[in-house]
Amino acid sequence: MAIFENIPLLAALFAIFFAQFVKIPIHFLLTRKLDFGLMTSTGGMPSSHSAAVTALTTSIAFEAGLDSPLFAISAIFAVIVMFDATGIRYQAGQQALIINQMRSDFQMFVSDLKDWPKKDNDAKIQELKTLLGHKPNEVFFGALTGILISILTYTVIL
């Protein structure tokens, strides 16, 4: 099948899987807690989004050249994805932290009121996900991961 011969696509997919997998040992080294849920979660070190778009862009540079329109499209796409990961998505995660704290404080306030009618005491409001985006160093190392994967693919493997 021709899709299995598309090296830029395969390099980008491998970069995603590699970046997601490597989050587990990095997290373990920092916290001494093994969390396999990181394999499918957003955020964290390194950024799999950055790894994917830089692997794709670097592979396209190898295949089509730095002067190709395809490289230009891919490079701009990569910049937008990495900017979004550190900007909008990171700020959304920070807002989720504050909203979760406000909800927790409100629940504590309500539970402290003795005469407050309690409904469904066992129901817990699900907290908002706070690990949505990336810190700049996570994006940098994700980008570096993707570039290195593509360079190794084209210089060592092929």
Image (cartoon, rainbow, N blue to C red):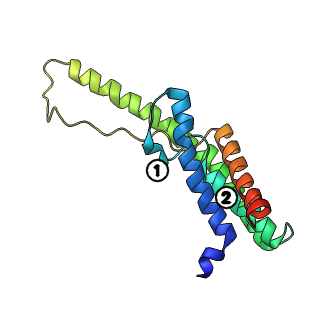
**Does 154 sit left or right of 110 as displayed?**
right
Q: Position of residue 62 (x, y in %)?
A: 80, 67
How many residues crowd around disc 1 within 10 Å: few (fewer than 14), some, or many (20 or more)? Answer: few
Where residue 107 sits: x, y (%)? 28, 27
Taking 137 as reference, is 90 left or right? Answer: left
Which of the 4 quarters of the picture holds residue 54? bottom right
**41 or 109, which is in the foreground?**
41
Q: Nearer the viewer, residue 108 or 137?
A: 137
- Give the Cα distance between marks 2 and 1: 18 Å
Residue 148, how many percent across, how many down? 74, 52
- Residue lying at the far bottom of the rendered structure: 1
Q: Looking at the rendered structure, which numbered label has been put on residue 56?
A: none
Q: Residue at x 14, y 36 (%)?
A: 120
Residue 61, placed above or below residue 132: below
Task: Report the residue at 80% width, 72% height from top.
Answer: 64
Q: Is residue 75 visible?
A: no
Q: Quadrant of the C terminus?
A: bottom right
Camera-near label (2 vs 1) is 1
Is residue 120 visible in this depiction of the protein?
yes
Q: Position of residue 144 (x, y in %)?
A: 72, 48
At horizontal 67% and vertical 39% (from top left) the residue drawn is 136
Q: Which residue is mark 1?
A: 40
Q: Is residue 69 left or right of residue 40?
A: right
- Using the image, tell me which numbered label, if any, was put on residue 53: 2
Q: Quadrant of residue 61?
A: bottom right
Pointer 2 and pointer 1: residues touching (CB < 8 Å)?
no
Give amino acid for label 1: Thr
